[in-house]
Image (cartoon, rainbow, N blue to C red):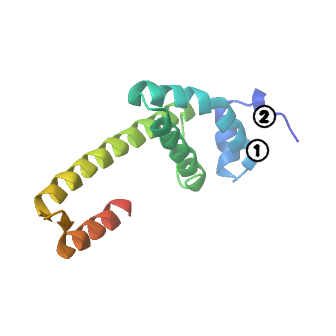
């Protein structure tokens, strides 16, 4: 197995585009801690930061042949930024759910109509 630590980011992106898992693993090893620290500095929550970084690398692998990456570092940091924004959006949606559930409570029981609407909204947000 080749030692890819001496490869440039551009060379690793080429390997990633060819679905080379060793190239992907080198990108992960090179950037994981940097991105995690960056996400943690923004979120101040270790679990949320780990989730954002996990999503970044999953998306990077899934989109490996579809995205033209010119600047790997910039691309990864942009993915982290987008992941943090998505997390903030999800938190806002959760706050909205809580407020709506308070509104629709009747003697401590949620109405069937509200629960159905909440499930539909969750499906839309998750897709």
Density class for disc 1 (Cα within 10 Å; few <14, some 14-19, many ≥20) is some
Residue under label 1: 22
Q: Quadrant of residue 91?
A: top left
Residue 65 visible somewhere in the drawing: no
Q: Residue 25: horizontal and vertical position, in percent?
A: 71, 41
Residue at the (39%, 41%) spot, across then down: 82
Answer whether labels 2 and 1 touch (C-beta < 8 Å): yes
Say which of 3 and 71 sits in front.
3
Work out which quarter of the rendered image holds the N terminus and state it: top right
- The correct choice, above or below, for 103 with respect to 6 in the image is below
Residue 13 visible somewhere in the drawing: yes
116 with respect to 24 (left or right) = left
Say which of 31 and 97 sits in front.
97
Given the current orientation, which residue lies at the most extreme right position? 1
- The correct choice, above or below, for 77 with respect to 127 in the image is above
- The correct choice, above or below, for 53 with respect to 122 in the image is above
* Label 2 element class: helix
Please tell me which of labels 2 and 1 falls first in the chain. 2
Say which of 5 and 125 sits in front.
125
Q: Residue 119: horizontal and vertical position, in percent?
A: 30, 69
Q: Please count the marks in the image.
A: 2
Residue at the (69%, 33%) spot, across then down: 29
Residue under label 2: 4
Residue at the (65%, 50%) spot, across then down: 17
């Amino acid at each position: 197995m080749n030692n890819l630590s001496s490869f440039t980011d551009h060379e690793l992106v080429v390997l990633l585009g060819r679905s080379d898992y060793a190239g992907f693993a080198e990108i992960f090893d090179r950037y994981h801690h940097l991105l995690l620290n960056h996400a943690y500095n923004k979120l101040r929550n270790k679990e949320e930061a780990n989730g954002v970084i996990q999503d970044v690398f999953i998306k990077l692998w899934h989109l490996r042949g579809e995205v033209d990456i010119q600047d790997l570092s910039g691309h990864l940091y942009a993915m982290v930024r987008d992941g943090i924004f998505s997390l903030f959006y999800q938190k806002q949606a959760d706050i909205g759910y809580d407020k709506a559930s308070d509104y629709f409570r009747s003697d401590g029981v949620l109405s069937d109509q509200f629960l159905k609407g909440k499930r539909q909204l969750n499906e839309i947000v998750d897709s």
